[in-house]
Amino acid sequence: MKDAAYTERPNRPLGIYALLYLAFLYIPVLFLPLFSFNDSLFITFPLKGFTTNWYGQMLTNEPMHAALMNSIKVGATTAVIATILGIFGAKAVTRFRIPGQKPVIFLIMLPLVIPGILLGVALLILLSRLGVPLSLYTVTLGHILITVPFAMATLIARFEGFDKSMEEAAADLGDNAWWTFWRVTFPMVFPGVLASLLLCFTISFDEFIMAFFLAGTDPTLPIYIYGQLRFPQKLPSVLALGACILVISFFVVFFSQWIRRRGTEEISGTGF
């Protein structure tokens, strides 16, 4: 009883640290939507007044719309390809014995620890040597490189979350490997697949360093925003766009994590 009471006692220092960390992380971000409604070109206190004019300018800014569509295209393509590669990789490392499996996983996860600027410069040099012109395709290639580890990390946990004897049972009933995957494995890992798609899309959509080195004449949205920071008269509409992206990104990440957690709870509840 004493041990149970001890474990249930809240850890106040840890709770205070968590609150301070969240405040340090998110309070500066909250100034973004605040100043997007400020009736002034300058980011200063006190606020001059309330206005929605900057959101109106955002809606009529054609170059911004083009950059937004570029980011959506790159993000969607990156999410699909990275998730497909993540599915293959996660299934391989959880269902088969691969020679040198740990070094292979280490190489796949290596982009998580290598600074993005080094990867960007390395890819730029490689593509220049190969004579590949910079474009949205090269940006997509760089984003796939850095999102595959996130996809695999999400999907490995999902593949390990259910009993592989279900796949063996399907094979015993006459299904080949392809139909076993689609009829048994894929429905079980689908929440992880959806979470991977949303996570990879969000990472690609917000990524700047790779796009900065690998983009050609068609900028992605982060590059466009970076370029507009030099012009004070265009900054308020950029703040309005940033506020919209902040809200949408929050809901996308929250939804992906909710799907992942719900899928894990369903598997735990069924006893797999």
Image: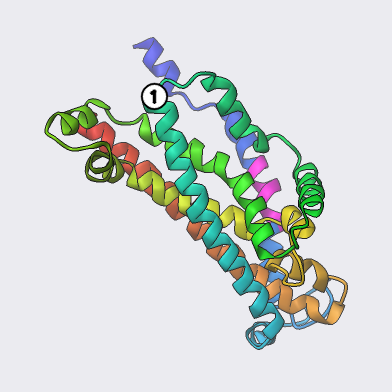
Residue 19 figure quarter? top right
* Residue for badge 1: 96
Percent across and percent down for residue 128 are 81, 54
The answer to whether residue 64 is visible is yes
Horizontal side, residue 120 vs residue 167: left or right: right
Is residue 271 something that shows in the picture?
no
For residue 23, side relative to residue 174 (left or right): right
Q: Is residue 60 above or below residue 255?
A: below
What percent of the width, then of the height, locates residue 21? 66, 41
> Which sits in the foreground, 236 or 123?
123
State the predominant SS element of the stretch in magenta: helix
Q: Is residue 142 rendered to the left or right of residue 217?
A: left
- Viewer-proximal residue among 22 and 199: 199
> Could you say whether the residue bearing mark 1 is in a helix, strand or loop?
loop
**What is the magenta range?**
20-28
Look at 86% across and 77% down and name the residue there.
232
- The x and y percentages for residue 260 are 39, 44
For label 1, the crowd category at 10 Å Cα-Cα, with few meaning under 14, some 14 to 19 and many 20 or more, is: few
Does the magenta-highlighted stretch encompass residue 23? yes
Question: Which residue is the extreme one toward the left?
Answer: 173
Nearest the eye: 183 or 47: 183
As displayed, is residue 59 above or below residue 166? below
* The C terminus lies in quadrant: top left
Q: Amino acid at mark 1?
A: Phe
Residue drawn 13% across the image and 35% down it:
174
**Residue sitting at x 67%, y 65%:** 136
Q: Could you tell me residue 171's position as x and y percent? A: 19, 31
Q: Residue at x 73, y 69 (%)?
A: 219
Residue lying farthest to the top in this orientation:
2
Q: Is 122 in front, or is 190? A: 122
Q: Is residue 174 above or below residue 65?
A: above
